[in-house]
Amino acid sequence: MAHRETAPDGGATGVAVSVREGLFTDTDPPRLLGSRCQACGRHHFPRHDTCPYCTAEGALPVELSGTGVLWSWTTVTIAPPGYGGDVPYGFGVVELPEGLRVVTRLTETDPSRLSAGQRMAMVVVPVRVDDDGHRVVTYAFAPQDPR
């Protein structure tokens, strides 16, 4: 995912690049890119040809649901080694309708504003600016019904 963003006056403001290719779509709304095992039927993320549950080969690529429910959460207040983005940031686990739990960044940083079972929607958020001046983006989940 690399696309040119356009400023209101029509001028280019830079290129947004994914933190890692193949994790999510650059669509509206965005979707996580996962796989579905043809043998056991389970979904997994990120995409891979081999099923992590039953080890069968030939998992099919799928776009996963863009919504889910919050399962667990915390706030990261100190940057991990090598991380160049802002802190604090929310971090948690969102369960998708496919039965898959995704470890993800959260847009909400205040844990008191989150609750188990809260509806969440996937969004694309900036993480940092790279050495070439490109905005690096990743997926995150935002509360659909803020507390």
Image (cartoon, rainbow, N blue to C red):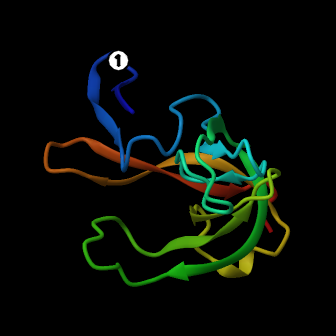
Q: Is residue 50 above or below residue 60?
A: below
Q: Residue furthest top?
A: 10
Q: Is residue 61 above or below residue 6?
A: below
Q: Amino acid at mark 1?
A: Asp
Q: Is residue 110 above or below residue 51?
A: below
Total marks shown come to 1
Q: Horizontal placement of 136 versus 70: left or right? A: left
Residue 145 position in % (x across, y down) = 82, 58
Q: Horizontal placement of 66 versus 57: left or right? A: right
Q: Residue at x 33, y 64 (%)?
A: 85
Q: Residue furthest bottom?
A: 78
Q: Residue at x 76, y 72 (%)?
A: 71
Query: Which quadrant of the figure contains the C terminus?
Result: bottom right
Could you say whether the residue bearing mark 1 is in a helix, strand or loop? loop
Q: Horizontal placement of 68 versus 111: left or right? A: right
Residue 5 position in % (x across, y down) = 36, 27
Q: Residue at x 69, y 42 (%)?
A: 64
Query: Which quadrant of the figure contains the N terminus?
Result: top left
Crowdedness of circle 1 by 10 Å Cα count: few (<14), some, many (20+)? few
Residue 21 position in % (x across, y down) = 39, 42
User: In this view of the protein, which residue sits in the foreground, 110 or 37?
Assistant: 37
Residue receiving disc 1: 9
Quadrant hosting residue 66:
top right
Q: Is residue 129 above or below residue 74?
A: above
